[in-house]
Amino acid sequence: MYDGIRSEKSNRLLIQALAAGVLLVVLYAARAVVTPLLAAFIAAFLIEPVVAAIARKTGRTAAAALTLALLAIGLAAVLMFLAPKAVREAKMAAESIELNITELNASIQRRLATLPEDVKTKVAEHLSAFSGKIIAVATQAVLKSFGILGNIADAVAKLLLFVVAFVFLMLDFPLIKPGLLKILSDIGWPPERTALMDRFLSESNDILRSFFRGQLLYAAAIGGLSAAGLVAIGLPYGLTIGLTIGLLSLVPYVGITLGLIAALGVSFYSQGTLLHLALTAAVFALVQAVDAVLLTPKLLGGSVGIHPLLAVIALLAFSQLFGFFGLMLAIPLAAILLAAFRRLLGHFAQA
């Protein structure tokens, strides 16, 4: 009798494991569609407290419409403030690159004029070969550019999917958890398992809310401090670099590293003095000191509680699955999977 019960449990576990494996394969195969849906869910999740607060006075539909209007106004205001500055800095960067290429070409010509004839011939041959490689690369780039229309169409389709999913999720977000629990109950899940799933969803909600609240505040602080410091020392494109650092800080371990490389490169390229390089490095050192002493302990410390090695593994794995959004969501998703694993172990231990 006991052997039959154990065999039945083993078969049930095997079926569940196979179902989980099939689900993962389907998610990976459909990741082009899953990614905008996942982004829409995260956006609706983040904005839900605002919608819920407004809905208590106006009703859910009116609250969703008002929230969408506020988001559109806020986005327009940000673009009106940042877009002109970004366009000016991009134009300055293009003009600077063109000027430096012209100066480099003139410098090469002056140096070539001082060389012996046979050396000039060899240098000209090497330059010609190098130019041929550049032309080949440019040709490939032009050929690839013909796929831009397809990429634009794909991006527009994903954006539309995101917007539609975001609107419907905003309207029905409070119904997601009860609906899922009802489905599990209707398909015959025992009440204790349904209660286990209820607790797991509540824990996942706490993990996600804690992570994103801390991460958004952290990114805003890092971006603001970096931009203020770089602008203060007169670094060209300092505002753009600083705000980009803040945006990239949504991905753990990425923003400050790429920002430092970009800022030092711009400083060396445009100013070219040890003083400006030292000032740029000092800004990042100061931002890192504030980060280590204040920002990380207050905003991120213990928010999800996973080991750094597991965090790196999660970043690599989820970036392969969902691209940039996978990088953003790797840490909380890893924490949720870890919580699920702990609950499953506890459930099997009790069983």
Image: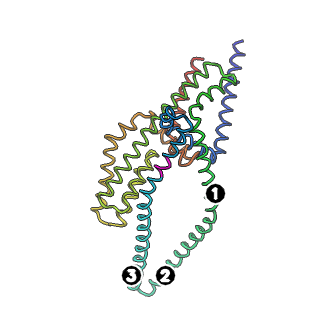
The amino acid type, in three-letter code, at marker 2 is Ala
> What range is drawn magenta here?
71-75
Q: Position of residue 304 (x, y in %)?
A: 45, 34
Toward which corner of the image does residue 227 lie, by quadrant?
bottom left
Q: Residue at x 42, y 39 (%)?
A: 214
Residue 111 circle label:
3
Q: Secondary structure at mark 1?
A: helix
Q: Residue at x 34, y 50 (%)?
A: 225
| Dot in front, 3 or 1 | 1
Q: Residue at x 37, y 46 (%)?
A: 221
Residue 33 circle label:
none
Residue 6 shown left or right of residue 104 in the figure: right
Marks 3 and 2 sit apart, C-alpha to C-alpha, by 12 Å
The image quadrant where one finds the N terminus is top right
The amino acid type, in three-letter code, at marker 3 is Arg
Residue 30 shown left or right of residue 60 in the figure: right
Q: Earlier in the sequence, mark 3 or mark 2?
A: 3
Q: Is residue 347 above or below residue 282?
A: above
Q: Mark 1 — residue? A: 153
Q: Mark 2 — residue? A: 124
Pointers 1 and 2 in contact (CB under 8 A)? no
| Dot in front, 1 or 2 | 1
Q: Nearer the viewer, residue 85 or 9?
A: 85
The amino acid type, in three-letter code, at marker 1 is Ala
Q: Secondary structure at mark 2?
A: helix
Q: Residue furthest left?
A: 275
Q: Earlier in the sequence, mark 3 or mark 1?
A: 3
